[in-house]
Image (cartoon, rainbow, N blue to C red):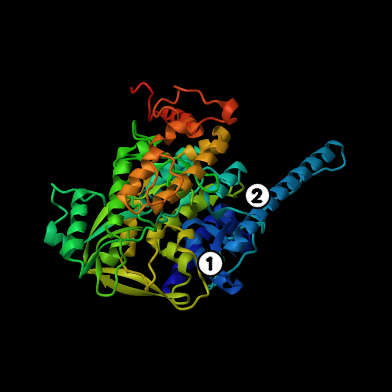
Amino acid sequence: MNKRLLCLLLSFLMLFSVVLTGCSEKTDDEAIADTQKEAAKNTVTLSMYLMSEEPVTEEQADKMEEAINKITKSKFKTRLVLHYYTEEQYYTALEDAFKKTKDEKAAKKAAEQALKEAIKRGEATAALTTTVDGTTAEPTVLNEYGIPELAYPTISENQVDIFYVGGYDRIMDYIDKNYLAELDEALSSSSKTLTKYLASETLNRSKTVANATYVIPTNEVLGEYTYMLIHKDVLEEYYHSTNDTSADFTMLTSEPVKDILHKVATYNSDEFVPLYSTTGDHFDISNVSYIGLDENGVYDNKTFSLIGGTTFESYRYGVTNNYYPYQSIFEERRFKAQVETLIEYKEKGYYQTPTEGKKFAVGYMKGSVDVPLQYEDEYEIIIVERPRLSERDLFHGGFAVSTDTHDSARAMEVITYLNTNVEFRNLVLYGVEGENYNIVEKVVDGKSYKTVERINNNYMMDLNKTGNTLLAYPLSSEPANIRDYQKEHVNYARAELDIGFISVCAEGNLNLEAMEYVRQLSADVYAKMLEIETLEEWQYFLKGNSNPDDDIEDYVGFENLWDKDEILYTMCLDSYSPMGDVYNSEKFGEGSSIAYVYFTWIEALGIYSISGV
């Protein structure tokens, strides 16, 4: 007899004998039914909503449900009913299910209340008969060996238990609508293992903003590095190594880099272009944060603004005196020094695009941690800035549990397994091995990696919307060791210093009309800065003198603009004394200045003190 079948029969007989003890008057069929009923007491059926890149056929969905339930039934006595929708369909279907579930609950509650009143009036004599959660157990089924399986309850087609949700605005909306269950209790107990697999910065800071954890992130690679690349031959010729402690290679505008560019332009122009930037413009300024609005009226610290200043790479969120500086950007000497050097590079023609047979000596790029993969053989890679996560990054997406779930503990068991178990995670992402994909082993630097080669396109899911990205096998077309680089990126990412401030702004604390004025003025100023070609023009630009060449018009004199423009001045007030002035609401409209709101906020968090204590 097959060993597996024999084990199953013995297990069933042992359970069967327990039921028969003390119940000898029952028939065999009755005893078996009691055994099933007892064993099935803790079975749970949950629904799981997944977003697919392409439509998933009913046949493929059935195969996935069978494969997934082999795992979840065995591990957790939990059956999953899967719902697949493309992004265009997903949120409409999800929110429709939320609504229908609430309507069903309201209707059930109304019916129960009506029955109670009817009983009181003597018009009815019995209460409604329902099972737990309004579900009904499925009929007994036999497995492939003819042995009865555990019975799992059925659920409403509108039931929502586990689901993916993405986007800051949508997540905040779902929290407000009470769609998302709080998950902190599970994270501190049964799902504590998640904290070993997911970036702590993401988990901790999202809780800081929302006052609870509502979404389990997927370790998506967010934010970007800023890199400076120096060709190894050039570095060897002029500086030997970036490890020279007497030379500062941390910024594009530092003296040794400036020296390398000058020497390459003078002596190596046949072999190299001096400087190649992929950032989109020629103001490659590092360690600067701005304070203002984006074009959609949302608080933004990355887009150029007349308000802001330079920061430090070592600063961490929530630490005393670690906050973004706040002043006129043109009064910030380090900002002006960087811009001046970059204009000098522009004037001397250092910025060029590599051509065939002519590489770049120094490169400046932004991107993920895998950028060095393309250049590390020929270039020394210098990290200028590590990724910082904005508030919107923290709520980019992940899995959540519905407040209407049948069993939040079981739902969190599934989410935890999805983010900690390699087999389960890759099943949800790629489908059934041997049917949807094959594993291809690759070796990089003596280390073996598993990669995926698709057999067909019957099951197409998004890496970032199906669980822990770092546990997913890369596609065979990707570098086999790419997850090693991405793990480094995720672990090094840090929260922006103003995490939480976007919510403060959104609550109507700011004079948005004045902020929009600052945004438009900042955009105009930056556009004019990009037109500057020489250091002479830069000096005219700052001081507001007439430009003899008339290449740039309408100089305002930005060093003096802060004092001349009343709205701009009152938006910033006195640089570090928000209580020193009172915003003139009669003159500038309702709402507070951004300086007042910002400094009051960081003081309340204990990051800043007006008294300096």
- Which three-letter amino acid code belongs to the residue tagged 1? Glu
For mark 2, give the secondary structure. Answer: helix
- The residue wearing badge 1 is 53
Front residue (pair 481, 195): 481
Horizontal side of 214 relative to 90 (left or right) equals left
Sort mark 2 into few (<14), some (14-19) or many (20+) by Cα contacts within 10 Å: few
Q: Quadrant of the N terminus?
A: bottom left
What label does residue 133 carry, if any? 2
Horizontal side of 59 relative to 544 (left or right) equals right
For mark 1, give the secondary structure. Answer: loop
Residue 450 drawn above or below residue 165? below
Residue at the spot x=49%, y=53% of the render?
Answer: 398
Residue 207 x, y percent position in the rendering: 46, 41
Residue 393 x, y percent position in the rendering: 45, 49
Pair 2/1: label in front: 1
Corner quadrant of residue 91: bottom right
Which residue sits furthest front? 548
Sort mark 1 into few (<14), some (14-19) or many (20+) by Cα contacts within 10 Å: some
Pointer 2 or 1: first along the chain? 1
Front residue (pair 116, 3): 116
Front residue (pair 420, 593): 593
Residue 329 appearing in the image: no
- Which three-letter amino acid code belongs to the residue tagged 2? Asp
Residue at the spot x=43%, y=65% of the render?
Answer: 426
Residue 248 drawn above or below residue 47? above
Front residue (pair 264, 502): 264
Q: Quadrant of the C terminus?
A: top left
Residue 296 appearing in the image: yes
Residue 335 x, y percent position in the rendering: 33, 42
